[in-house]
Amino acid sequence: KESLPEYITDKAKQEAMSPEAAKELEAAKMIVRNLQADGEIAVLAGGSVRDELMGLAAKDYDIATSASPDRVQQIFSD
């Protein structure tokens, strides 16, 4: 099951994004999914969430996670 908010998985909104913005969103989603797949809590946070709630385009994506920095390095070094 998709564990990202609807606004992040909405295909119409993604298609309206610039190619660069769409690429950044896909990268953020991949990071969240990889962290979650390894049993960590991971969510989008900060300005991207605020911007979406205000109907604005996100400038960047912040991720909050339960994983320690060492654990993040371990997950993404594989």
Image (cartoon, grey):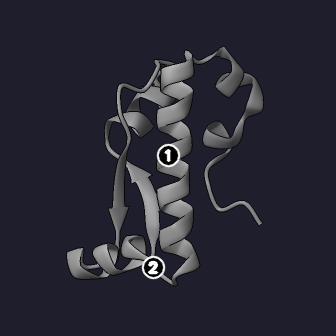
Residue marked by disc 1? 27
Q: Position of residue 49 (x, y in %)?
A: 43, 39
Label of residue 44 in the image? none
Q: Residue at x 63, y 37 (%)?
A: 7
Q: Quadrant of residue 75?
A: bottom left
Q: Quadrant of residue 64?
A: bottom left
Q: Is residue 16 above or below residue 45?
A: above
Q: Residue at x 40, y 70 (%)?
A: 76
Q: Position of residue 74 (x, y in %)?
A: 34, 80
Q: Nearer the viewer, residue 19 or 64?
A: 19
Q: Position of residue 73 (x, y in %)?
A: 29, 74
Q: Position of residue 35 (x, y in %)?
A: 47, 71
Mark 1 falls on what kind of element?
helix
Q: Nearer the viewer, residue 57 or 50?
A: 57
Q: Residues within 10 Å of mark 1 (few under 14, many from 20)?
A: few
Residue at the extreme left: 69
Q: Nearer the viewer, residue 65 or 15?
A: 15
Q: Is residue 47 above or below residue 21?
A: below
Q: Residue at x 47, y 20 (%)?
A: 57
CA distance for labels 2 and 1: 17 Å
Q: Quadrant of the C terminus?
A: bottom left
Q: Residues within 10 Å of mark 2 (few under 14, many from 20)?
A: some
Residue marked by disc 2? 40
Residue at the extreme front: 78
Task: Determine whether, in the image, residue 73 is placed left or right of residue 48.
Answer: left
Q: Nearer the viewer, mark 2 or mark 1?
A: 1
Q: Quadrant of residue 42?
A: bottom left
Mark 2 falls on what kind of element?
loop
Task: Determine whether, in the image, residue 60 is placed left or right of residue 21.
Answer: left
**Mark closest to the chain's N terminus, 2 or 1:** 1
Q: Amino acid at mark 1?
A: Ala
Q: Quadrant of the N terminus?
A: bottom right
